[in-house]
Amino acid sequence: MTLSIRWKVTLGSLLAVTCGLAVAGMLAIQALEQQEASQLSEMLDARTKLVEYGLKPVFPSPPDTPLPRQIQEIVRDLGTRSAARITLVAADGTVLADSAVADADLSAVEKHLSRPEIQQALATGQGKDIRASRTTGERTMYRAIAMGPRHEGKPVFLRLGLPMTMLEQETAKLQRNLAIALGAAFLMAVLLSVWMARSITKPLSDMAGVASRLATGDSTIRIKTHSRDEVGQLGDALNRMTDQLRAKIDELSEDRAQLLAMLTSMVEGVMVLDYRGHVLQVNPALERMFGVSRTEARGRPCAEVFRHRRLIDLVAAILRTRANHEDEIVLAPTGRCLHIEASVAGGERENEACAVLVFHDITELRRLEKIRKDFVANVSHELRTPLTSIKGYVEALLDGGKDDPETAVNFLSIILKQSDRLNLILEDLLELSKIESGSVSFREEPLDLRNLIERTLSMIKPMADKKGHQLISRVSDRLPPIAGDEGRLVQVLTNLLDNAVKYTPEKGTITVAAQELADTSLNPTIELTVADTGMGIPEQDRPRVFERFYRVDKARSRELGGTGLGLAIVKHIVEGHGGQVWVEGNQPQGSRFVVRLPVRKPRGSA
Ligand code: ADP
């Protein structure tokens, strides 16, 4: 059991007071007893002398005469007067008279020669002793003196005995009074010790309470100090310490909040490891990249949380070599490509940052790189094909073909066709690069989309008729006017219709529709669709047909005179107008290209 300071102080001071009082009481009682005893002794001396004086005339002279018969009576009388027991003892110890013994019993009283006080009086003329009387049974103080030759020529001893009962009663009374006084003093001491202990320990226990509340995180609490003593100084020091602690905690919390905000808002994934490779921190971006949760990851070995061989090897390498590393990994099954920069932070203990890994998602970058590489390869290929053809026919002409007019005309017309194709590709490429570079700004003129569609359809009609296609127009009567670049939007529709005619076998149906979308959650939008009943586009190719030179069937496209750039141009123009384009399957067969354009009010219209 642990005692509180208050009880320790109280009990300690009480113990000290009790010991002091007990010793003082004992000494006082001893001193009082001694004083009482010496007073009694003096009184006995005086009475002895008086009795001796009173007895002197009683003894006959000459000394060998027998004692008068009334001696016993005189002794009893003197005993009563002096309030003491008086005994006269002959030199042989025979009791001659005794005030406490009846006359008849006197002869039966044993000899008193062996009594210590008689022995002393025999030797020195006087003696004293304190003991319980064999005759009366009371504790008695004796005084004996030799009275010279009085009886049968020998000395007689006069002995006075005073019972100690009076003294004992006095002492008991004194002890009682003393006990009462000491009890009162003890009670006072108890009250004083409790009060003192309280006044000393109260500020301390207050401080203990405040300190434990501080420990639970309540830094607003203050210790109230009233005194300027050590306890007051301690309270002030604790208050100052609390202020400093609070300032430090605030500072740390702010830093931590800023750090967390940074980590949370980062697009890059961040992971912090200690020297054992245990995860200390991961940010939300990393959680999303790997599909792990921060609470699960924290404190666990990296190899356990991220089951990616290459990442585990990279972490092992950085922890082993303590040098910065870089690597690229691909995540299965998403195929996302991550570039990792691992740098050493230097922590050497558990839960201390030792390595920081930053993950950049470079999937898009790699995709664009691939598109660029493919593009260069495609451009070269696309340009080389007609050029090779032209070169081949020119060589054939030079080799003698020119001599046969019919062959020459045939070869020259092929050369012209290939030159036209080359020209077409270069024009499309130029157009595309102009749109991509942003050097072309789309005009924002008021447009009547219905009219634009009708005009484009009439342009494409001869081509469609050639293949026996049916052209259907389903344009809503209530299309709002929009702001856009008419020439470019005609190009969009022409490219889509051109493809529909090209990639639909003869006698197909091509439907153009336009309407304002009823969905009020969207901004006012117009949806333009071109659907055909042709060969359609396999689902996996659909997102890619808008890439430059991407063709589902290269040979067929080329044969039909396509450059592979038409849809790329469409995409750029539509996005340049703030819209979207995609392709879906048409029911029951064919493709359906969807263009959504935001309704932007022409300038100047209400
Ligand atoms: P191309 O000049 O080859 O037509 P595009 O960019 O216009 O180039 O089209 C890309 C590819 O998309 C085409 O080669 C073709 O494979 C496919 N495609 C485009 N439109 C259609 C369509 N209406 N039906 C089927 N396939 C289409």
Image (cartoon, rainbow, N blue to C red):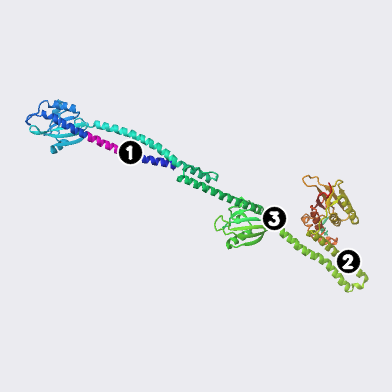
- Report the Cα–Cα distance between label 3 and label 1: 92 Å
Q: Earlier in the sequence, mark 3 or mark 1?
A: 1
Along the line of sight, which residue is nearer the eye, 138 or 9? 9
**Which residue: 88% across, 72% down?**
397
Residue 74, x across and y down, in percent? 14, 26
Q: Do the CB atoms of the residues marked 3 and 1 lie less than 8 Å apart?
A: no
Instruction: Classify the position of the N terminus by image quarter.
Output: top left
What stretch of residues is rendered in magenta?
A: 26-39
Residue type of the residue flagged with mark 1: Ala
Query: Which residue is disc 2 drawn over?
Result: 416
Q: Residues within 10 Å of mark 1 (few under 14, many from 20)?
A: some
Residue 425, x across and y down, in percent? 83, 63
Ligand 1 closer than 8 Å to the CB at disc 2?
no
Q: Residues within 10 Å of mark 2 (few under 14, many from 20)?
A: few
**Which residue: 58% across, 60% down?**
319
Residue 137, x across and y down, in percent? 21, 31
Residue type of the residue flagged with mark 2: Leu
Ligand 1 closer than 8 Å to the CB at disc 3?
no
Q: Is residue 587 visible?
A: no
Query: Which residue is disc 3 drawn over?
Result: 334
Q: Label 3's element?
A: loop
Query: Which is closer to the viewer, label 1 or label 2?
Result: 1
Q: Earlier in the sequence, mark 1 or mark 2?
A: 1
Overall secondary structure of the magenta section:
helix
Rendered image: mark on residue 22? 1
Query: Which is closer to the viewer, label 3 or label 1?
Result: 1
Q: Residues within 10 Å of mark 3 (few under 14, many from 20)?
A: few
**Residue 276 among magenta residues:** no
